[in-house]
Image: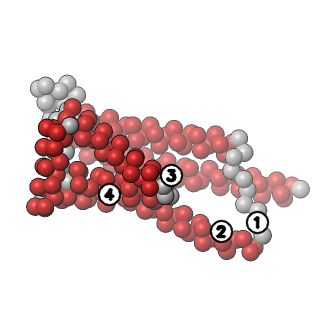
Amino acid sequence: MIDQNSKLASIRGNDYFKPLTEWLMWMVLVLVALSQVDNFSQEIAAYRFDADGWPITITLALGAGATLQFIFQILRIKSGGAAPNVQPSAEKKTEAKTSQATKLTNIAIFLLPFVYLLLVPRMGVYFLTPFFIVSLMLLLKVRSIKALLGITAISYLLLLVVFTRLFYVALPVGRWDFFYDFNNWIIVVARIGM
């Protein structure tokens, strides 16, 4: 009985490892982003938060979101939400394949924003954002066509209304000819046609 309790205690200790590791990865990302904010630090006469106001706000929101997620995961584990893995050996092979697929999906979810950020200066925000949103939702196992199209359309319209029409923020339009022309066309349509 004591051996079983110590085994459960060690499993519980391992339950904290994954949320802590994930939180630390997000915090490293936040620190890297904050270290790059000085590149935007310029005074803008008509804007009291300067050019680095948005990057700082988004980065701090990312850190706050990661911290809240970490707290919720720890509370769920403490309340007994994470059950110990006691399964027959026949199911362990299936679980290993599922676990490997889950790890690959998690890595893809983590890397997708970096690919997006790498391609945005070349292809532009307005062209690439719908593909980014759909790709992310597919990685998150959203399979409903209505959800894919609806969420993408709403997010894209909010992007156009808030950044292009309301604030006139100059988002990257891309360096490659076709994408540059397409992104500028979208800006004109959003500012005049909406």
Q: Nearer the viewer, residue 122 or 189?
A: 189
Quadrant for the N terminus in the image: bottom right
Q: Residue at x 30, y 45 (%)?
A: 156
What is the number of callouts on the image? 4
Which amino acid lies under the numbered mark 3 shown in the image of this protein? Glu
- Mark 2–mark 4 Cα distance, whole angstroms, equals 31 Å
Q: Residues within 10 Å of mark 3 (few under 14, many from 20)?
A: few
Q: Residue at x 52, y 64 (%)?
A: 103
Which amino acid lies under the numbered mark 1 shown in the image of this protein? Gln
- Mark 1–mark 2 Cα distance, whole angstroms, equals 9 Å
Reply above or below: 37 against 53.
below
Name the secondary structure under disc 4: helix
Query: Seen in the image, is 159 located left or right of residue 80?
Result: left
- Mark 4–mark 3 Cα distance, whole angstroms, equals 25 Å
Which callout, 3 or 2, points to the residue nearer the camera?
A: 2
Image coords of residue 173 (percent x, y): 16, 51
Instruction: Locate residue 107: give its quadrant.
Output: bottom left
Name the secondary structure under disc 1: loop
Instruction: Locate residue 52: give its quadrant.
Output: top left
Q: Residue at x 54, y 68 (%)?
A: 101
| Disc number for residue 95 | 2
Q: Circle 4 sits on which residue?
A: 131
Which callout, 3 or 1, points to the residue nearer the camera?
A: 1
Q: Are marks 3 and 2 in contact (CB under 8 Å)?
A: no
- Mark 3–mark 1 Cα distance, whole angstroms, equals 26 Å
Q: Residues within 10 Å of mark 4 (few under 14, many from 20)?
A: few
Q: Circle 3 sits on which residue?
A: 22
Of the image marks 2 and 4, the number of the one nearer the N terminus? 2
Q: Are marks 1 and 2 in contact (CB under 8 Å)?
A: yes
Q: Circle 1 sits on which residue?
A: 87
The color scheme shown is secondary structure
Which amino acid lies under the numbered mark 4 shown in the image of this protein? Phe
